Image (cartoon, grey):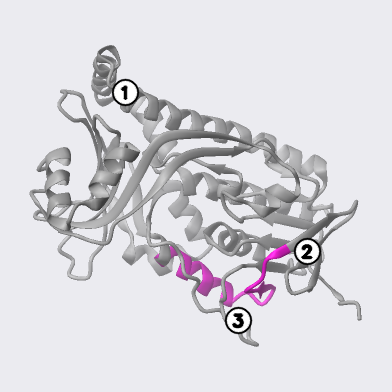
């Protein structure tokens, strides 16, 4: 017996943050006749969808996200921000310093006429809110737990076979399946990879003093250390997220320390801006690499988020870059639908890719430059970067340009 193909307009491979965000953004689009787009999400995790398409939350990563001001505004348009804003810690000030040197720079929200430069939120909180929002979208269906077994591209559509032999057909597929994207592999799209020879240690920590909504970026001899404000149940403002980027060898040493020893090392490296570290939560670590697909689009396919670009966390721009991918793609598709034209024509997808290329290049260039400059022990570069921090701190036009880019504008 041959399985009947289930036809939808868009198939999204991957139900993580990028996949859910893409599904929600596209779920609001309609054809020229007013019919909503039909969307299928293929996700490897078991989400226990019931007959009403109500979905329990996926097991999202425990890390935190630094949401830019622009990203928060976009989430408002999707009616997601309203559900999570009370759990998002505003960043009112960014404090940049170079350990053992004089260079410092500070950015203040009020100087740029915004209430916050950005926000910090736990990934699971945003993920749960996206899934709950999708429960209200009858035109979105889940196929989970499922994985893609094969993809066949045709001139007017794409056929996908799932691992349980189900068959799906759509005009467009979105590869939202992460840094090891199967979609990318099926399309034989090569990637540029670069190891930063660094490891990030992440943990939630509690300090003696409240963070007062200040985000700290501290450059050290081994790499950048970020302390980001978080919300906490007792509203003490003492809970923060730590992202400590260092050499693999130093990361191994830090990971093996007991909590007390780790806290002592953190105090010595970060300083006492927030007093002593009172508590260290569960620690995790992961290697840092740049992965960038050579092509962002393929015949009737677009790579979104980490499937397209995985970047260094030094400026907290990874998720924000992927969100702008989603925003631009949704805008492009809305125009195509209003004109009753093919949402996945290669010419249209190529224009989308060309539009996004500049943003990708700028953000990847920014993060690469910051990593090279602030993870270097050569004296001329140390002097140069400290002079640069001073200039950044006092040159308002330069500061405005830098802040606007990090805010997502």
**In magenta stretch: residue 134:** yes
Q: What residue is pinned by disc 2? A: 9
Give x and y (percent) for residue 60.
Answer: 46, 65
Q: CA distance from mark 1 to mark 2?
A: 49 Å
The secondary element bearing badge 3 is classed as loop
User: 321 or 291, which lies in front?
Assistant: 291
Query: N-terminal of the two: label 2 or label 3?
Result: 2
Locate residue 382: give its quadrant.
Answer: top left
Structural distance between the alpha carbons of marks 2 and 3: 20 Å
User: Helix, strand, or loop for circle 2?
Assistant: loop
Q: Secondary structure at mark 1?
A: loop
The label shown at residue 36 is none
Task: Give the vertical position of 250 relative to 103 (above or below).
Answer: below
According to the picture, the residue beneath numbered tag 1 turns out to be 376
Alpha carbon of mark 1 to alpha carbon of mark 3: how far?
50 Å
| Rendered image quadrant of residue 355 | top right
Mark with earlier residue (1, 2): 2
Could you tell me which quadrant the N terminus lies in? bottom right
Residue closer to the observer: 41 or 252: 252
Nearer the camera: disc 1 or disc 3: 1
Residue at 57% of width from left, 81% of height from top?
Answer: 48
- Give the residue at x 27% y 39%: 250
Q: Residue furthest top?
A: 380
Instruction: Count neighbours of disc 2 (C-alpha within 10 A) and say few if under 14, some if 14 to 19, many if 20 or more.
Output: some
Instruction: Give the extent of the magenta segment.
Output: 125-148
Judge whether 300 appears above or below 351 on screen. below
Residue of label 3: 49
The residue drawn where x is 36% and y is 58% is: 121
Q: Position of residue 16 (x, y in %)?
A: 54, 62
């Amino acid at each position: 017996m041959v399985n009947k193909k289930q036809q939808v307009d868009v198939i999204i491979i991957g139900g993580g943050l990028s996949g859910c965000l893409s599904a929600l953004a596209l779920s609001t689009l309609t054809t020229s006749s007013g019919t909503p787009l039909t969307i299928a999400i293929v996700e490897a995790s078991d989400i226990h969808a019931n007959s009403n398409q109500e979905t329990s939350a996926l097991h999202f990563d425990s890390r935190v996200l630094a949401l830019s001001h622009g990203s928060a505004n976009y989430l408002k348009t999707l009616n997601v921000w309203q559900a999570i804003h009370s759990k998002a810690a505003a960043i009112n000030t960014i404090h940049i310093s170079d350990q053992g040197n004089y260079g410092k720079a500070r950015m203040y929200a009020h100087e740029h006429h915004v209430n916050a430069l950005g926000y910090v939120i736990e990934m699971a909180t945003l993920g749960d809110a996206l899934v709950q929002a999708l429960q209200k979208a009858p035109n979105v269906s889940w196929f989970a737990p499922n994985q893609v077994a094969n993809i066949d591209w045709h001139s007017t559509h794409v056929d996908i076979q799932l691992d349980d032999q189900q068959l799906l057909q759509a005009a467009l597929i979105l590869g939202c399946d992460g840094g090891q994207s199967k979609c990318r592999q099926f399309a034989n799209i090569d990637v540029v990879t670069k190891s930063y020879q660094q490891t990030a240690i992440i943990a939630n920590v509690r300090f003696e003093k409240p963070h007062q909504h200040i985000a700290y970026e501290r450059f050290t001899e081994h790499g950048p250390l970020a302390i980001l404000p978080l919300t906490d149940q007792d509203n003490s403002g003492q809970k923060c997220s730590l992202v400590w980027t260092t050499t693999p060898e130093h990361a191994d040493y830090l990971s093996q320390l007991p909590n007390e020893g780790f806290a002592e090392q953190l105090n010595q490296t970060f300083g006492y801006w927030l007093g002593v570290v009172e508590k260290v939560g569960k620690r995790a670590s992961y290697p840092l690499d740049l992965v960038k697909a050579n092509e962002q689009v393929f015949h009737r396919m677009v790579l979104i988020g980490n499937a397209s670009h995985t970047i260094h966390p030094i400026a907290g721009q990874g998720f924000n870059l992927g969100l702008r991918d989603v925003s631009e793609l949704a805008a492009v598709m809305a125009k195509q639908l209003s004109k009753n034209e093919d949402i996945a024509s290669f010419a249209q997808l190529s224009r989308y890719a060309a539009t996004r290329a500049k943003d990708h290049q700028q953000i990847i260039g920014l993060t690469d430059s910051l990593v090279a400059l602030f993870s270097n022990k050569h004296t001329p570069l140390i002097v140069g970067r400290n002079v640069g921090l001073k200039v950044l701190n006092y040159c308002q036009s330069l500061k405005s340009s830098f802040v606007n880019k990090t805010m997502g504008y």
